């Protein structure tokens, strides 16, 4: 749905290159995605801290601060250690309503040594906004973040 991904991935690479601070990279990437992806109303990160997700850098409306692992789309992405591509959040059992305007969501785990340390979370007010190409391209950005942490 977004043919600007090669440019966005290149911009993310330039922002992250040489920077190992996770929070700084999350802040820049959330701003980059929020301002360059169409039909997105929230883009940001949750960090795994003491068996829960805690809100990290983001762009958009205020969000849930803490999410238990295994709860909602983000918590499920952590416990399953896999990308969640949700066409309709109302059909996702256990969805947590942080913003009633959100209709679809994509969540991609960020791993260090195959352990999830955070997730990239993007919401849209459009049903079925995200597709496999979005997941593939966003995974390239997550890979850049993961590589910065090695």
Image (spheres, rainbow, N blue to C red):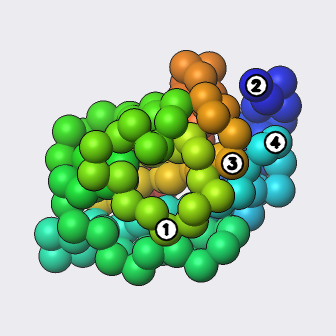
Q: Are marks 4 and 2 in contact (CB under 8 Å)?
A: yes
Q: On the image, numbered disc 1 is attached to which residue?
A: 98
Separation of residues labelled 3 and 1 (CA atoms): 13 Å
Q: Earlier in the sequence, mark 2 or mark 1?
A: 2
Check contact, mark 3 vs mark 1: CB within 8 A: no
Could you say which is closer to the camera, residue 55 or residue 116? 55
Callouts 3 and 2 close, C-beta under 8 Å: no
Work out whether mark 3 precedes mark 1 in sequence or the reverse, and give the earlier one: 1
In the picture provided, is 137 more to the left or to the right than 12? Answer: left
17 horizontally vs 112: left or right: right
The residue lying at 28 percent from left, 43 percent from top is 93
* Circle 1: element type: loop
Q: Earlier in the sequence, mark 3 or mark 2?
A: 2
Residue 20 is labelled as: none
Q: Circle 2 is placed at which residue position?
A: 1
Tell me the element at label 4. Answer: loop
Q: Point out the tag, 1 or 4, that comes first from the N-terminus.
A: 4
- For the residues marked 1 and 4, what is the alpha-carbon distance in whole angstroms? 20 Å
Quadrant of res 42: bottom right
Distance (Cα) linking label 3 and label 2? 14 Å
87 to 24, vertically: above or below: above
Which residue occupies 46% across, 43% down? 89
Residue neighbourhood size for the residue with mark 1, other residues' Cα within 10 Å, grouped as few (<14), some (14–19), many (≥20): few
């Amino acid at each position: 749905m977004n043919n600007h991904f090669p440019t966005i991935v290149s911009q993310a690479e330039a922002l992250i290159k040489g920077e190992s601070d996770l929070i700084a990279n999350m802040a820049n990437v959330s701003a980059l995605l929020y301002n360059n992806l169409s039909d997105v109303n929230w883009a940001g990160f949750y960090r795994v801290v003491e068996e829960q997700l805690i809100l990290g850098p983001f762009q958009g409306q205020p969000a849930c601060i803490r999410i238990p692992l295994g709860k909602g789309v983000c918590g499920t992405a952590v416990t399953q250690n896999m990308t969640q591509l949700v066409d309709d959040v109302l059909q996702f059992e256990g969805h947590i309503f942080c913003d009633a305007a959100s209709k679809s969501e994509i969540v991609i785990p960020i791993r260090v040594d195959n352990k999830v340390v955070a997730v990239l979370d993007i919401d849209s007010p459009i049903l079925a906004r995200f597709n496999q190409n979005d997941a593939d391209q966003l995974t390239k950005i997550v890979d850049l973040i993961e590589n910065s942490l090695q």
